[in-house]
Image (cartoon, rainbow, N blue to C red):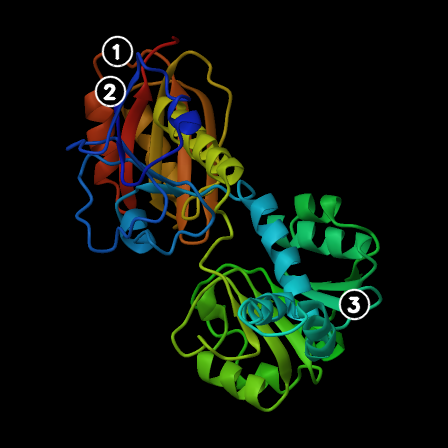
């Protein structure tokens, strides 16, 4: 029986993916094998020694202590693409709101409720202050062409915009889904200098924090509109305010409220609504649940942020998983343990991702030797976790 602890309310459609005869789920589980969460901040949490995998029902994982997990061999999953359509729809909404001054107009109309005279005449007289350009024929620059960026680029192109994109790490899968009408920018500076509207879709990490800083804003086309529905920290606040005040930006639309921006007339802020749809929550919960099930039962990794994707069909024999630092001679050290115990390796796959690597081994005739093999594997310098995933075909 596997134990799963939930740290947030998780959609029932996701929880129902766990086979009830193999998994027990609770928000009070003391020694869980896996943790399932959404936005709960784990940085101040003591993660139990029993935890092998953590799945975040969403794309961002800045609420999880990734470095600590990696050092302990805990595989952290996210659900890229699970909320992509929901975010795409909100970005397109922000694109239109940033251009047509719809939200400002709505607020102004509310002031007419107690006004004297003909409201229709007051409306016609006052509407000129909310004039805004159409997006058709304008240029949209998309920074980051992952699951969300590709969807936004394709929709904008269908709405009649000229779309240019920039992503030095464009995946083959994303390239297949990207419209052939989307043009490639040579750099971010090239993109922002040509774009009437700019939308950013990159993950937040040390290399992307404050991507939009004073230097990049100096390259932005005068009067451009910037959309940020990825992470607030991708834009440097002081530089942003300066760009809004000096006319570099005519509007900033974001899903991440900041005290310094609230009340600014050329800022449109929503309360982090990107994935706030029932469909998105269900999709992400289902993906996260499946990731934990496949990892705990079969050692399979898909959509991990700290360890490589690793999948091999289960042969029905004993399977062992090893997580380790990506250093030379590790494979030799691991296979030497099996040779010492006179064990045959029936099937093996090893993958690496940056500083970390992961191995799955299916082996014969391990009866009575499993515990000693695991102990020997853990003694190898650089191995951070090893476990018998499954002993026999189910």
Q: Which element type, helix, strand or loop, lies under badge 3?
A: loop
Q: Residues within 10 Å of mark 3 (few under 14, many from 20)?
A: few
Can the viewer see residue 190? yes
The residue indicated by pointer 1 is 367
How many labels were placed on the picture? 3
Q: Which of the image's four quarters has the N terminus?
A: top left
Q: Earlier in the sequence, mark 1 or mark 3?
A: 3
Q: Position of residue 384 (x, y in %)?
A: 27, 43
Is residue 43 toward the left or the right of residue 105 in the image? left
Q: Which element type, helix, strand or loop, lies under badge 2?
A: helix
* Distance of label 2 from label 3 (alpha carbons): 67 Å
Q: Which of the image's four quarters has the C terminus?
A: top left
Q: Residues within 10 Å of mark 2 (few under 14, many from 20)?
A: some
Q: Which element type, helix, strand or loop, lies under badge 1?
A: loop
Rendered view: 174 above or below 156: above
The residue indicated by pointer 2 is 370
The reply to whether discs 2 and 3 touch (Cβ–Cβ < 8 Å) is no
Image point (50%, 74%), residue name: 235
* Distance of label 2 from label 1 (alpha carbons): 7 Å
Specify the quadrant of the image occupied by residue 122. bottom right
Labelled disc at residue 134: 3
* Distance of label 1 from label 3 (alpha carbons): 71 Å
Can the viewer see residue 143? no
């Amino acid at each position: 029986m596997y134990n799963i602890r939930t740290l947030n309310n998780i959609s029932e459609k996701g929880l129902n993916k766990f086979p009830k005869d193999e998994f027990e789920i609770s928000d009070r589980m003391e020694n869980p094998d896996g943790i399932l969460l959404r936005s709960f901040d784990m940085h101040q949490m003591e993660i139990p020694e029993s935890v092998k995998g953590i799945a975040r029902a969403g794309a961002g994982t800045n609420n999880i202590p990734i470095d600590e997990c990696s050092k302990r061999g805990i595989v952290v999953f996210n659900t890229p693409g699970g909320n992509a359509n929901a975010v795409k729809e909100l970005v397109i909404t922000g694109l239109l709101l940033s251009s047509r001054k719809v939200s400002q107009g709505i607020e102004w109309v509310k002031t007419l409720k107690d006004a004297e005279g003909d409201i229709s005449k007051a409306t016609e007289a006052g509407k000129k202050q909310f004039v805004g350009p159409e997006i058709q024929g304008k240029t949209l620059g998309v920074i980051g062409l992952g699951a969300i960026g590709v969807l936004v680029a394709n929709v904008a192109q269908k709405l009649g915009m000229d779309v240019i994109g920039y992503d030095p790490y464009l995946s083959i899968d994303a390239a297949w889904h990207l419209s052939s009408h989307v043009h490639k920018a040579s750099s971010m500076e090239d993109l922002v200098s040509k774009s009437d509207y700019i939308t950013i879709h990159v993950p937040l990490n040390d290399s992307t924090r404050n991507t939009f800083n004073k230097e990049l804003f100096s390259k932005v086309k005068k009067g451009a509109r910037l959309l940020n529905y990825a992470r607030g920290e991708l834009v440097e606040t002081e530089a942003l305010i300066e760009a809004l005040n000096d006319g570099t930006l005519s509007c900033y639309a974001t899903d991440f409220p900041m005290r310094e921006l609230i009340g600014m007339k050329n800022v449109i802020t929503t309360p982090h609504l990107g994935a706030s749809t029932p469909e998105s929550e269900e999709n992400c919960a289902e993906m996260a649940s499946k990731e934990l099930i496949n990892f705990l039962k079969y050692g399979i990794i898909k959509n991990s942020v700290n360890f490589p994707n690793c999948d091999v069909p289960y042969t029905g024999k004993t399977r062992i998983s090893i997580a380790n630092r990506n250093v030379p001679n590790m494979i030799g050290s691991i296979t030497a343990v099996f040779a010492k115990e006179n064990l045959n390796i029936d099937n093996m796959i090893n993958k690496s991702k940056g500083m970390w690597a992961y191995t799955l081994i299916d082996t014969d005739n391990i009866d009575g030797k499993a515990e000693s093999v695991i102990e020997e594997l853990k003694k190898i310098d650089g191995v951070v976790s090893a476990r018998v995933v499954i002993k026999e075909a189910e």
